Image (spheres, grey):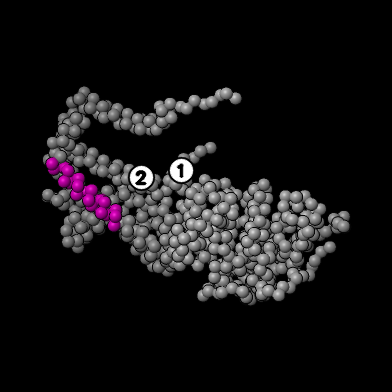
Amino acid sequence: MSQTARPPSFLARNRETLLRIAIPILVVVCLVLLWQVLVTATGVPQYILPGPSAVAVALVKDWGTLSPALWVTTKITLSALALALVGGVGIAVFLVQSKWIETAFYPIAVILQVTPIVAIAPLILIYAPTTQVALLICAFLVAFFPILSNMVQGLKSVDHNLLNLFDLYGASRWQTLIYLKLPASLPYFMTGLRIGGGLSLIAAVVAEFAAGSAGAGSGLAFRLLEAQYRLNIPRLFAALILLSALGVVIFAITSFIAWLGLHRWHESSIRREN
Amino acid sequence: MTETEATPPTASHKRPLVAMRNVSKSFSSGTLALSEMSLTVQGGEFVSLLGPSGCGKSTALRIIAGLGDVTTGEIDWPSSRINSKGLPEGDISFVFQEPTLMPWQTVFGNVYLPLRLTGISKAAARENIMACLDMVGLKDFADAYPRELSGGMKMRVSIARALVTKPKLLLMDEPFAALDEITRQKLNDDVLRLWRETGITVIFVTHSVFESAYLSNRIVVMKARPGRVHADFPLVTSLDRGPLYRTSEEYRATCEKVSHSLMEAIGFPLADGMEMH
């Protein structure tokens, strides 16, 4: 009866969390070290495969060229994602208003989605007033569809009993949308957001390749191509690292937003305890 | 000792709360769910609709609630103000078989919903909501989310939400069918207490003889294919219904009476030996 469990120490309590952070970092550090060792040992020329130290030097030295490009790409990616969120949710709400509206307009959304973006890009370049706008439209078109299709699915998956309940209490269409359909489709929206976030970055890069934009106002994709033409491979790697860092940040932010919205109530964000 | 004829309960001089007249309902699949059903419910009654599955008892309840139209016949609300949808305004509440709570809202938010939909502010509704939560014993759980509650507690939230509009008529569609026996008995006692305290009218759909015999003061036994009323009789008890009543001879006799009526409705042949005194 006198046995009382001693409170576990800080390390014991947070062991799993610490390991979760430490293990991936350790793996990345090992891989980078291996890369450096291999490059030094084999003596590969820098214009074929630079070592991580050369890439780091390029990152610092070329920061003046790379940072404006990073900023341009970030701007295009985020504005495309924002537009895709507004458009995707808005059009999803419009589509589910009636079966006939969906029948009429959903195929158009599908056609826009399945047509490869690289193939439409030249056309968009002709019509868009500036290259930046063209890139924005391309990135928007790609990011928009996963958000739309997830939202349509979410809006249609509302519990029928809850819909009956809202009917019973005489809820208007607007009230049903605001208090029931939108909150109920939040998990679907978050899935769309995470997919759309990743895709808008990919589309921003691919569209810039397709557009062949050049000069001062260009994004990271142009800097990447430029570095390749000049055989400045360390800078190419530096640009690549910036792109993946941007992707990781977007992923982290969208995941955090999903967690914020769902962690109090949705199974996907709750730890299972048995 | 069976009542094959539908015997209406003692006529009251009051106007009835709701009257179904020759209501039939067929689904788009062609199934006739209800055939020529008539039912008049007086204010303050506790009516159980009892019957086998497929007898249309849930359909009848949904029609009374205005969820789904009648094919023929009519529903009348002689003592209520009727809104544009032909429903009595704010007078009916529904408790579904599942708790039907919004998982993204707290217990408080879920109970607030019916008031929120009528445009009442959270501050103005607070007192009423807390009183309803108190009535079902969940005052301390106002800030909990539905997933943190047990099945019985979720059902209590659902009942609190139904009571928050102070309805005249509470419709319950097999509300405790998915709960364990102990929780179910507890909730039966709670519903009885609420019925006594608030004077609300209850129409309770169940397939349990024991539940209907324990709760109601009138039982409507229904028959399947097509759904229709088989027997309609009042239950009067001399004892207070409570834990003691569950083991009383009177309760046993009531269960037997209800059970026989249900067996007839199902068409179960009664052997001679089963005919009890």
- Assess disc 2: are there few (<14), some (14-19) or many (≥20) residues with their C-alpha within 10 Å of its C-alpha: few
**Tag 1, which secondary structure?**
loop
Report the side of B127 relative to B230 (left or right). Answer: left
Mark sitting on residue A270 = 1
| Disc 1: CA contacts within 10 A as few (<14), some (14-19) or many (>=20) | few
* Residue pictured at 44% horizontal, 61% vertical: B121
Chain letter of mark 2 equals: A
Identified at 68% across, 50% down, the residue is B185
Of A271 and A138, which appears nearest the observer?
A271
Q: Foreground: A47 or B134? A: B134
For label 2, the residue is A256
Rendered image quadrant of residue A144: bottom left
Residue B83: x, y in percent? 53, 74
Q: Main secondary structure of the magenta part?
A: helix
Residue A23 horizontal/vertical position (percent): 36, 30
Q: Is residue B19 above or below residue B113?
A: below
Magenta highlight on residue B128:
no
Label of residue A142 in the image: none
- The answer to whether residue A203 is visible is no
Q: Where residue B235 sits in the image (x, y, percent)?
A: 76, 62
Question: Which subunit holds the residue at mark 1?
Answer: A
Q: CA distance from mark 2 to mark 1?
A: 14 Å
Q: Residue at x 26, y 27 (%)?
A: A33
| In the displayed structure image, the side of residue A86 where residue B181 appears, left or right | right
- Quarter occupied by the C terminus of chain B: bottom right
Residue numbers of the magenta segment? A64-83
Q: Hey, what amino acid is under mark 2?
A: Phe
Amino acid under disc 1: Ile
- Residue at 76% from the left image edge and 66% from the top image edge: B233
Asked if one can make out residue A177 in the rendered structure from this viewpoint, the answer is: yes
